[in-house]
């Protein structure tokens, strides 16, 4: 299940979620890794909270039609909680890493993973591991793509393809490469 | 002046100077939020104003030349420290949380207990992260350092990446 969530059904390359951060924060490997770790933390924590809200509030009181709105609220709260926590843990770390957190609030991958795990009808530990694996897949692709873009920055690219066009072409090649994982896991 | 290829740079504006030569800086606008055509109607501003966010990220630097209020400067942190910081702040609490949740699941096999254990584990991980971050801060690697005065039209994308 974890291999399927991370590689076969990769959040970015198979489900096409989180594309804005995929293109926007992958200019350097370190910033991509920082964004990936922050997103991993937020996706895992918000998925835990979303699972609890779904099980003990939305399912229990027949409020399934409020799922999307509720999840958005939970995600925004999780990001705020993370921001406050990092600030409390270390103001210096907050100065360094705080830039990523507002970006995560609007990252559709976070909402997408929460909705997917609800559809999967998993138990708590299964849902949390699914969310964690999905976010690991997101981080992996972010770092790989950042590495490729660092190389591209040194390469001589035809003027017509310079910038985002060559980035999208590389992303499509990466997506095709990840199709090679199909068949490893059916989940 | 402090700069090498392994520096992640950002532009900041001086908002205050100390008599001893230190300076207080605010990072320049690092997000497009609040600047689009829908800014007036956007609910996102309820979470926190851009000015408030920037003020919350105000930081202090020592060393470098004498700065004046309004100066734009390029500051930087070592890229390795960014990664170490992210690992300490995010990976460590998650790891401890998963360990606690895994143990609880094996012992009790109840979703509620597993969830509570993971929450406690996360909290313990955050305490560990705090201790680790304190040690890193004491070593001096976490603080942004002065790199150079920014050129008039200098604008680094997203404030962090070159």
Image: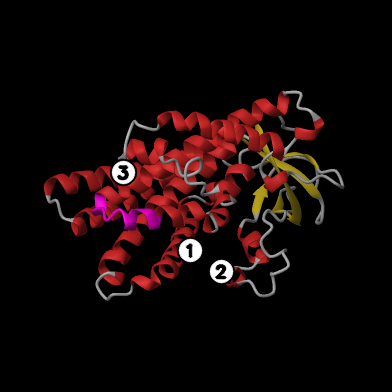
Over which residues does the magenta segment extend? Answer: A114-125
Q: Which corner quadrant holds the C terminus of chain A? A: top left
Q: In this rendering, does residue B6 appear at all? A: no
Residue depicted at 35% across the width and 61% down the height: A50
Q: Is residue A118 left or right of residue B22?
A: left
Quadrant of the rendered image containing residue B28: bottom right
Residue depicted at 22% across the width and 44% down the height: B102
What is the CA distance from the residue labelled 2 to the residue labelled 3? 30 Å
Image disc number at residue A60? none
Q: What chain does mark 3 sit on?
A: B
Q: Nearer the viewer, mark 2 or mark 3?
A: 2
Q: Secondary structure at mark 2?
A: loop
Crowd band around label 3 with a 10 angstrom C-alpha radius: few (<14), some (14–19), many (20+): many
Q: Earlier in the sequence, mark 2 or mark 3?
A: 2
The percent position of residue B81, horizontal first and vertical second, equals 55, 35
Crowd band around label 1 with a 10 angstrom C-alpha radius: few (<14), some (14–19), many (20+): many
Q: What chain does mark 1 sit on?
A: A
What is the CA distance from the residue labelled 1 to the residue labelled 3? 24 Å
Please say if A17 is above or below A137.
below
Mark 1 touches mark 2? (CB < 8 Å)? yes
B3 and B38: which is toward the camera: B38
What is the CA distance from the residue labelled 1 to the residue labelled 2? 9 Å
Residue labelled with disc 2: B47
Does residue B92 show up magenta in the picture?
Answer: no
Residue labelled with disc 3: B96
Q: Is residue A172 left or right of residue B153?
A: left
The percent position of residue A14, horizontal first and vertical second, equals 47, 42
Residue labelled with disc 1: A76
Q: Which residue reaches farthest right?
A: B152
Q: Secondary structure at mark 1?
A: helix
The percent position of residue B93, horizontal first and vertical second, equals 37, 46
Q: Which corner quadrant holds the N terminus of chain A? A: top left
């Amino acid at each position: 299940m974890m291999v399927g969530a991370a590689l076969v059904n990769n959040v970015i390359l198979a489900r096409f979620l989180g594309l804005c951060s995929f293109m926007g924060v992958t200019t350097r490997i370190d910033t991509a890794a920082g964004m990936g770790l922050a997103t991993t933390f937020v996706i895992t924590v918000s998925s835990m909270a979303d699972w609890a809200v779904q099980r003990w509030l939305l399912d229990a009181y027949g409020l399934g039609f409020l799922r999307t709105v509720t999840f958005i609220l939970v995600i925004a709260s999780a990001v705020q909680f993370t921001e406050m926590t990092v600030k409390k843990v270390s103001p210096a770390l907050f100065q360094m890493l705080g830039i990523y957190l507002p970006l995560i609030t609007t990252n559709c991958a976070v909402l997408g993973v929460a909705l997917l795990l609800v559809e999967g009808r998993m138990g708590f530990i299964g849902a949390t591991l699914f969310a964690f694996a999905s976010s690991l897949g997101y981080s992996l692709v972010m770092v790989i793509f950042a590495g490729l873009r660092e190389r591209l920055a040194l390469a001589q690219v035809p003027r017509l393809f310079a910038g985002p066009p060559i980035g999208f072409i590389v992303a499509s090649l990466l997506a095709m490469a990840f199709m090679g994982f199909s068949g490893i896991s059916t989940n | 002046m402090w700069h090498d290829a392994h520096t992640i740079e950002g532009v900041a504006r001086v908002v205050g100077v100390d008599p001893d030569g230190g300076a207080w800086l605010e990072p320049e606008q690092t997000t497009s939020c609040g600047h689009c055509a829908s800014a007036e109607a956007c609910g996102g501003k309820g979470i926190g104003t851009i000015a408030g966010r920037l003020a919350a990220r105000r930081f202090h630097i020592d060393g470098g030349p004498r700065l004046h209020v309004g100066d734009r400067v390029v500051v930087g942190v070592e890229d390795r420290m960014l990664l170490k910081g992210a690992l300490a702040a995010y990976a460590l609490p998650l790891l401890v949380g998963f360990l606690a949740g895994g143990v609880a699941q094996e012992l009790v096999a109840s979703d509620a207990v597993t969830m509570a254990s993971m929450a406690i584990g996360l909290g313990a991980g955050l305490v560990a992260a705090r201790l680790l971050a304190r040690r890193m801060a004491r070593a001096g690697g976490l603080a942004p350092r002065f790199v150079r005065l920014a050129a008039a039209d200098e604008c680094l994308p997203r404030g962090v990446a070159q």
